[in-house]
Amino acid sequence: MMGTSGHRKNSRGLPTGQLIVGILIILAGILLLLETTDIYPTGDILRFVPSLFIILGVWALVKSRLQTFFGPIILILFALAWQLIALGYVTWSQIFDFWPIILILIGIYLIIGRYRSRVRESKSAYISSFGVFGDVNKRNTSSDFTGGDLSGIFSDLMVDLRDAKISDVPARVSVSVLFSDVDIYVPSEWNVQIDTLPILAECIDRRRKSEEEHEEVDLIVDGIAVFSDVYIKE
């Protein structure tokens, strides 16, 4: 109950990355199932699937308050080009003429990244991170940490919990990543239980064995990792 309330409070009313990605995957799956089983012809609707990725990119921008923009912008541009091609407005050869835009965006990203902090600190009881083609680094110092959700597509996610405290164990962090790397830093004395489903992935605790081990679980890391690495570090 505590984890749920913390989630609502600290996500600022926005749905989590796992929820958004899950809904988009379900919608695409339903449309494909209707088409492949001949229940209903959804070919015309499937032409608008790229728009779902545009929505995902826009949501990622809003979620990060424009602090993480390179990945979402790349996703939006790619999905927009895909959508225009699917609707027959342009061809891939015409789209390719605009590839230098990517170089411009990389330059803007490097300039802005030079003047901003790479690690964002939070005292919220619940953390929520979503990355698309980028890096997300967070440090949590909550005295009542309850958990969080980490979602990423072609991203590197880092969460530092070494200064966080858990008053009601276990806290739970849910991971949902595709082609991504996740590093979760925790105190050496925490007992971490990994329940993440790895699919062609690696999910392991890389910490050295602590002399302060105890049976009670402090943190549960669950979810799914596809072509990704999830590591617990100290």
Image: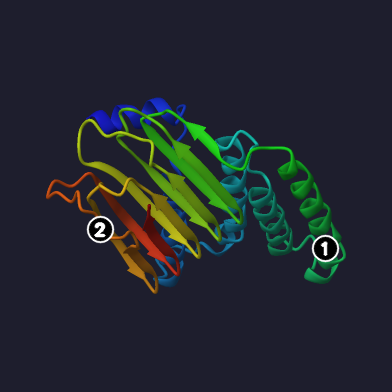
Look at mark 1 in the image and give the residue it sits on: 99
Residue drawn 66% across the image and 57% down it: 79
**Residue at 35% across / 62% down in the picture?**
206
For residue 141, which quarter of the picture?
Answer: top left
**Nearer-the-camera pick, 222 or 24:** 222
Of residues 186 and 168, the one nearer the viewer is 186
Q: Residue at horizontal 33%, vertical 59%?
A: 207
What is the number of the mark on residue 195? 2
For the N terminus, give its image quadrant: top left
* Amino acid type of the residue tagged 1 in the rendering: Trp
128 over 207 or under it: above or below:
above
Q: Residues within 10 Å of mark 2 (few under 14, many from 20)?
A: some
In the displayed structure, does residue 66 sit left or right of residue 99?
left
Seen in the image, is 31 located left or right of residue 134? left
Nearest the viewer among 78 and 160 is 160
Quarter of the rendering containing residue 63: top right
Secondary structure of the residue carrying numbered label 2: strand
Q: Quadrant of residue 60?
A: top right
- The tag earlier along the polypeptide, 1 or 2, is 1
